[in-house]
Amino acid sequence: RSVVKLSEERTTTVPIMVYSQSGVLNTEYLDIITTFAVGNIDTLIVDDIEVTNYNESTRTFVAMVENSINEHEVQVLADNNYVTLELADSVGIGSVTSLVTFAPGEEVKTLTLYVTGETDLTQTYTIVLAQKSSNVELAQVKVNDVTLQEEPGHVFAKNIDKGAKKVKIEVIAEYPYATIKVGDTEVKTGSSGTVWLDIEVNQDEITIPVVVTSADGITLRTYNIILTRKEI
């Protein structure tokens, strides 16, 4: 019995030496061929820029793309040259390239990537192309789980208990890839922002700024949540 270290190449050749009863040495060779049951994504490139925003738990890539470009090139490279990749209408072995366009008014496009190994086992990945929108609107603002209506001047108002020391604020941007900052707390892009804030007990009126920065990084808007302590 012996242990064979597999080559980094697909095929590992192992010599097998056999001695006959007369002492003659015969050498035969055994080729061990590695089968790639599955494949992983090594690199994703969109419009010549490598995408590094990847969620491993959901196998999702997010690429921010320029809205001035009509056709976007999406190139996927697997970690081996033996798996089949399918993306949109394109199919490739080891890699695949597809050209993607947005429909009028469409800001986010979701693509499904299928990676099939040599044993027909398939893994799926999600590729999200999000345009660098200038949208800084808020879809929803909640304070202590109560939805507030926007007032003139980008203001949201709410009465709170006289002795309240903390307040729960949830903010959802209309465009999911805008960046939200509630007070001094920045919320991760692509999600709603729920934060608990400490508030001064001796202040009857408290203003909490909510700053939304557009995905294109150009437009910035400040909303104000005004909390007023109600009399007991």
Image (spheres, helix red, strand yellow):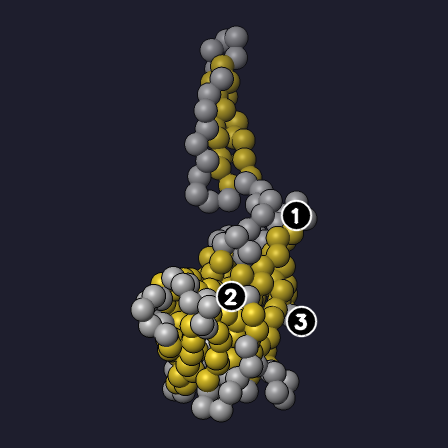
Residue 137's label in the rendered image is none
Distance from label 1 to label 3 (Cα)?
Answer: 20 Å
Q: Residues within 10 Å of mark 1 (few under 14, many from 20)?
A: few
Viewer-side residue, 186 vs 152 = 152
How many marks the image carries: the answer is 3
Residue type indicated by callout 2: Asn
> Quarter-wise, where is residue 125 in the image?
bottom right
Instruction: Write the residue at 50% across / 70% down.
Output: 143
Q: Which residue is mark 3?
A: 89
Distance from label 1 to label 2 (Cα)?
Answer: 47 Å
Q: Position of residue 22 (x, y in %)?
A: 50, 9
Q: Which residue is mark 1?
A: 121
Q: Residue furthest top?
A: 21
Is residue 5 found left or right of 124 in the rendered image? left
Residue type indicated by callout 3: Asp
Q: Position of residue 43 (x, y in %)?
A: 46, 62
- 35 vs 101: above or below: above
Viewer-side residue, 112 vs 230 = 230
The answer, for residue 28, to whether it is visible in the render is: yes
Disc nearer the start of the sequence (2/3) = 3
Q: Residue furthest bottom?
A: 152
Residue type indicated by callout 1: Leu
Q: Which residue is mark 2?
A: 144
Disc nearer the start of the sequence (1/3) = 3
Instruction: Write the residue at 62% across / 53% down.
Output: 123
Q: Position of residue 132 (x, y in %)?
A: 47, 81
Task: For mark 2, give the secondary structure.
Answer: loop
